[in-house]
Image (cartoon, rainbow, N blue to C red):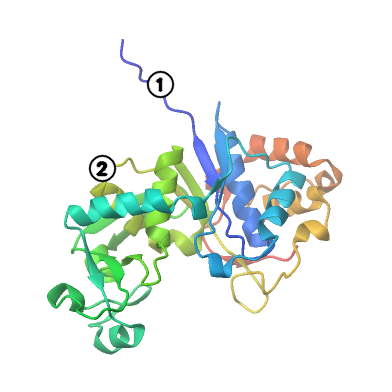
Amino acid sequence: MKNTSTPPTVGRFAPSPTGPLHFGSIVSAVASFLAAKQHCNGRWLVRIDDLDQPRTVKGACDSILRDLESLGLHHDGSLVFQSSRSDRYQRILDHLTKAGHTYPCGCSRKEILASAPHFGEEGPIYPGTCLVTPPTSSDKTAVRLRSKSQRISFIDLIQGGCEQNIGDDVGDFVLQRNDGIFAYQLATIIDDHDSGINLIVRGQDLLLSTPRQIYLLDLLSWSIPRYAHIPLVMAPDGQKISKRHQPQSPCTIYSPGQILVAVLTFLGLNPPADLGSAEANTVLSWGLEHFSFSKIMKHNHQFTL
């Protein structure tokens, strides 16, 4: 008899070790943990997105892992570091190149800005200069993915229906920079695929990246996970909260219970105030019972811990 059972939910949290966790990162960690663990046999993995080694801060990874443990966010499986997976990324990039999906690009940012036909959703649209006239310089080149006028649609579990035309709104995007560093769009889909991730819960600032990742997944004939993009925590200055706003992790100032109750409040779960004096596991258990994507508001909003 054919097995029609639903596969276990596998989620993940993938911080970059560029400094301590701030409240916005903790919101993403908790939301992804609850969404995965709410399901029977659900698994929650942690990956360290340290591809861009020049931006990595010494000791940041250990600090992040300590904070997650203190909040009761214990990950399943082995810890994965992107910096150790370059060979895997290169093999997939070579596969895409052999299939005719990529081309080298020697254009500078200044040249692209000057010749872009129009601006897309995240910057100037590359005009395809090196696709028409391949670079002849001995300088290092980037690798771009050929795009086409194709609408990518998906249903986000929080934001609802989303759609983007890859060719018109994004253009030919970079898969490997001219310094050899693999782009986030390529590395993240490979890591998620290899780890069996089927539920991605992350910040709304990555919503516009999702169609590009789906486009790549389609080219590789890989399965597409479910996505849920949570609203961003905004600082009083109107900017997304970042390490600039919180140079110290909240875990060095507040108790785990206080932090988790604040996160659950931001996620629209309305936890009782006295829950903040409880142990982390007690707060998380309450969160698992009450978590629902439908309770999370769609829009970014300010929140003070």
Report x, y in % for residue 227: 44, 48
User: Is 16 displayed left or right of 304 in the figure?
Assistant: left
- Rendering quarter of residue 282: top right
Residue at the farthest front position? 138
Q: Relative to 83, does residue 5 appear above or below in the rendering?
A: above
Task: Name the amino acid type tagged 1.
Answer: Ser
Q: Circle 1 sits on which residue?
A: 5
Q: Circle 2 sits on which residue?
A: 221
Q: Residues within 10 Å of mark 2 (few under 14, many from 20)?
A: few
Report x, y in % for residue 117: 22, 83
The residue under the point 40% across, 42% down is: 193
- Determine which of the numbered discs, if any, sits on residue 163 in the image: none
Q: Nearer the viewer, residue 173 or 136?
A: 136
Q: Relative to 184, does residue 9 appear above or below in the rendering?
A: above
Q: Relative to 221, does residue 305 appear above or below in the rendering?
A: below
Report x, y in % for residue 235: 66, 72
- Rendering quarter of residue 119: bottom left
